[in-house]
Image (cartoon, rainbow, N blue to C red):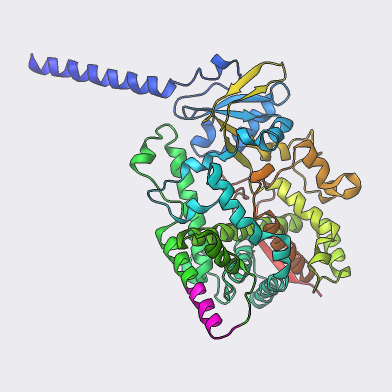
Amino acid sequence: MFLVTFILLACLVISLVAAFVLIYLRWHFNYWRKRGVCGPQPQLLVGTFPKSSVGRCNPLEELHEIYLRYRVSQRFVGIFTARTPKLFICDPQLASQILTQNFKSFHDNESSQWTNASVEQLRLCSPFVSTGEDWKARRSELVPALTINKIRSFYSAMRDSAQKASEFLTAVGEQPQDAKELANRFTAQFMSNFIWGIEGNAFNVPYKAQSATSLSPVHRMARDIILQSLQCVRYYGRTTAWPWLRKIRPVRFFPVAADRFFQQLLTDALNARAQQKTAGGGGGRGDVIDHLQQLMDKKSLNAVQIAGHTTTVLIDGYETGAMLIAHCLLLLARNPRAQRKLREELLAADVTDSFDALNELPYLEQCLQETLRLFPPLPTLFKLCTEPISLKNFDESTLTLQPGDAVYISTYSFHRDAEFFENPNDFWPERFAEELGGVRKYREMGVFMPFGDGPRMCPGMKLGLSEAKVAVSELIRNFHVSASENTRTDNKIGKDSFLLTLDGNIELVFQRSE
């Protein structure tokens, strides 16, 4: 009798727990319907992302399917990440308004909720994850170090890094190279100089696939930050339905070793400059450390905040720049006509000592902008509502958002919409020619924003573009580039890439031109 009673009680408890869990998981599923907002029907645990939740595709691809389904009839639709409601913007003009005119109602990024102060140090100093007034302060501290004049003053260092890449390719011969790895060597080489004034040594070690010993210290630590960040994004994806787990087990975006390394690197750089000053050395180099050292005196910033700024600049220049370079080389390798046209432009120009002359090359600019269209560094913008605001749909119905509501904008979808870009999957740089309206035409339409838009546009945009122009111009001038048989021929994106990249390696062959 006791055993039967125990079994019945156990079954009752299990049923109650199961019912509670089911109610918990479905609790918000009527959230958008009650507000008169349409959208795809969510499913348990996976929300409106059933395929990407089980690793069949990138979430961007499912978001793009939703965009194509609703973009004509709806300015915005309701979606769900697991059980959490999000508002997905389908109208580029509304997206532009959210990022610019209505910025005060959306001035925070959702990624600010992904960083835990109990485990992170340096990442909290990034303007990308800072909020409110703190964001304004962090951005104002960083932007002066990334002006076009600052970048121009390091043009010779940038060219020297590109020449080292060229020498490296000549030394290894015509064996296929991982273009992303090559690009990261270049950006690690230059960023070491630009930030800390040190020799990068990124091309002084032989490349061995998956081997940390083949990387210079700055390169290795920057790579480890990217890999750790990818693991964090996966963790946040797995815990979407159970966000309270993140408080129980917070995770770091930056490895502990990387925090220690960059704090020590800052200390060493500041000590070296103090000794130089004591010995009667000349003025500063004008690099990022010089700028941040002045901030320490003016704004009483501590060493952690300064080191955090160095990692923000590093990741912008290291990863964003490298991805643009690698994808541009890939697209040129697949399109011999465009590659020949660009090489002719480069051979006819003298940009050896002129940063401005390089920036005046129209076809180089068009090639890079077309690369950014197909592989934007910020493919999705995750914004948080910070002040109540009402949005109108096409049918004049109104939705009022409250602080804390999340809004998603897919630049990837705008960039690949045939209504705005003819044959959107094709690489056609001429679509950005000035005589056709150039970049400005698409920006004014709200359909081209590879670095975001408005006050929180990526501060490293000019730096990444400049690095790419120097690297691509050096390599295309001196090498004929082709894709190996191991590189895919379409633009399918990686399933788990949070920074948009091609699925699989970008393996290219560099043949020295005559």
**273 magenta-colored:** yes
Lateral position of residue 469 relative to residue 224, left or right: right
Question: Looking at this view, is 65 or 365 the one in front?
Answer: 365
**395 magenta-colored:** no
User: In terms of secondary structure, what is the magenta stretch mainly?
Assistant: helix
- Total number of numbered discs in the rendering: 0
Q: Give the x, y percent position of residue 500.
A: 61, 47
Is 332 rendered above or below residue 31?
A: below
**Direction left: furthest residue:** 1
Is 513 rendered above or below residue 62?
A: below
**Direction front: furthest residue:** 298
Quadrant into which the C terminus falls: bottom right
Q: Give the x, y percent position of residue 282.
A: 63, 81
* Residue 106 in which image quadrant: top right
- What span is colored magenta in the figure? 268-281
Q: Residue at x 35, y 23 (%)?
A: 21
Lateral position of residue 435 relative to residue 235, left or right: right
* Residue 195 visible in rendering: yes
**Direction bottom: furthest residue:** 279
* Residue 63 in which image quadrant: top right
Q: Give the x, y percent position of residue 504.
A: 59, 52
Q: Residue at x 60, y 49 (%)?
A: 503
Quadrant into which the N terminus falls: top left
* Residue 361 in which image quadrant: bottom right
Q: Give the x, y percent position of residue 401.
A: 58, 25
* Residue 497 visible in rendering: no
Question: Looking at this view, is 356 or 239 the one in front?
Answer: 356
Is 256 rendered above or below residue 490?
A: below
Question: Looking at this view, is 21 or 130 the one in front?
Answer: 130
Lateral position of residue 96 relative to residue 109, left or right: right
Q: Residue at x 60, y 19 (%)?
A: 37
